[in-house]
Image (tube, helix red, strand yellow):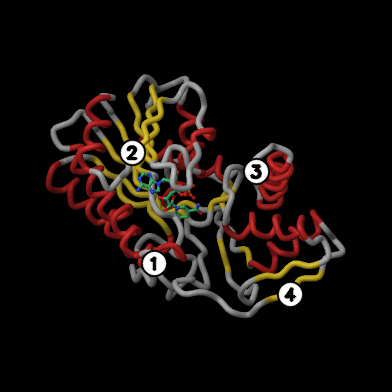
Amino acid sequence: MLKGKNILVTGGAGFIGSHIVDRLVGECTVTALDNLSTGKEENLPEDAIFVKCDLSDSDAVKKVIRDADIDLIFHIGANASVPHSVDHPRYDFDTNALGTFNVITACLNSDVEKVVYASTAAVYGEPVRTPIDESHQLHPISPYGASKLAGERYGFAFEETYGIAFAAIRIFNTYGPRQPRYVMYDFIHKLRANPQFLEVLGTGEQIRDYCYVSDMVDGFVMVAERGSGVYNAAGGHPVSIKELANLMVSVISPEATIQYGGKTWAGDVNTLYADISRIRGLGFEPKVGFEDGVRKMIAWFEEMGQSPGF
Ligand SMILES: NC(=O)c1ccc[n+]([C@@H]2O[C@H](COP(=O)([O-])OP(=O)(O)OC[C@H]3O[C@@H](n4cnc5c(N)ncnc54)[C@H](O)[C@@H]3O)[C@@H](O)[C@H]2O)c1
C-alpha cells in the first residue's frame, strides 16, 4: 500500500505524470520533479511539492531524492516523442537513458524501496506477432525506443546487482485530458479549425491500442503496490487510425470529408496491439471504453479552448 509514503513522480507536471500525482496526493506526500519542457506547473494540484530539475543533472536528482526522503519513485519523465528523438537523438539519450541511469543510481544508499518505470511499446519495434506479449522480441526502430529500452535494462540490472526493486510498464497509446499533442489532439484541433475537412497523415491503416489515462494510472498504482518485472498496459483492443478518424468526425463534425496523406514518418510502427494478460493478473481492467474516452478528450479540449492562453 502506498498510503503515507513519500513519493517522487518524475515528469510529474506532464500528461501521465500529473494524473499519477492527482491520484496520490491526499494519501501520500508527493514530490513532482520536472524540467517543464513539455509539462506545465498548472497541471499539478496545490498539495503536490514541485521541484524544477533536469533528469540529466545527476547531482540535482540525487538531492531531490535525499531532501524529500523518498520511499518510492514513479519514473515517468522522459522525452516521450518519437519524432523528437529522431530530430534530437542526443537530447533523447540524455533525458531517457542517462536520466533513468541518474534516477536509479540516486537510489543507491537511499531509502527508496522501489522504482516503477514508464517504458513503452516502442521497445518492441514492428511486431512479428500480435497481440504483443511481454516475451515478444525487443527490436526498437527509433532512438526513442532504444533509449527507453536502455532505461529498462539498467533498472533490471540494478535490481539484480544492488537490490533496488524495479518494475516497468510498457505503455501503449495513452490519451486523455492534459495531452496537448499527438494524433487525437491533432484531429480535434484540425476539425475545429476546418469542420469540412480532416487530413490524416499516413494511410489510416495503422493499428493502435488506446488506453484512457485514468486506467493507465490504475495500472501504475497496482504495479507499485504488488508488481515486479515487466508489464504491458493498454486498452486491450486494436483500433485503426481510420476508425479513430471516423469516430472523431462523427462526434465533432459529421459533414467533414477525410483525406489520407499516405506517408508515414521515420520511426513509426504500423501495428501496436497488446496482450495485457500479465497486468490483468494484478487486477488491471480498463474501465473507460474507447468511444467514451474519446468523448471525454473532446470535452476537455472544448473546456480548454475557452481558457486564455490555450
Ligand atoms: N502517452 C503515451 O501514449 C505514452 C506511450 C508510451 C510511453 N509513454 C511514456 O510515458 C511517460 C509520460 O509520457 P507523457 O505522454 O505523459 O508525456 P509528457 O511529455 O506529457 O511527459 C513527460 C514529462 O517529462 C518532463 N521532462 C522531459 N524531459 C525532462 C528532463 N530532461 N528532465 C525532467 N523532466 C523532463 C516533461 O516536461 C513532461 O512533463 C514517458 O516516459 C513516455 O515515454 C507515454
Whole-angstrom CA distance, mark 3 to mark 4, is: 27 Å
Left or right: 59 with respect to 143? left
Closer to the chain start, of discs 3 and 4, is 4
Judged by depth in the image, the label closer to the viewer, 4 or 1, is: 4
Residue type marked 2: Cys
Residue type marked 4: Gln
**Local crowd size for mark 1, using a 10 Å CA cut-off: few (<14), some (14–19), many (≥20):** many
**Residue 269, placed above or below residue 21:** below
Tell me residue 112's x, y (percent).
24, 32
Closer to the chain start, of discs 1 and 3, is 1
Closer to the chain start, of discs 4 and 1, is 1
Quadrant containing the N terminus in the rendered view: top left
Tell me residue 264's x, y (percent).
55, 76
Whole-angstrom CA distance, mark 1 to mark 3, is: 35 Å
Q: Which residue is mark 2?
A: 53
Q: Residue at 68% across / 50% down in the picture?
A: 294
Q: Which residue is mark 3?
A: 310
> For residue 124, which numbered disc appears in the image?
1
Left or right: 78 with respect to 172? left
Q: Nearer the viewer, residue 214 or 245?
A: 245
Whole-angstrom CA distance, mark 2 to mark 3, is: 25 Å
User: Which element carries disc 2, helix, strand or loop?
Assistant: loop
Closer to the chain start, of discs 2 and 4, is 2
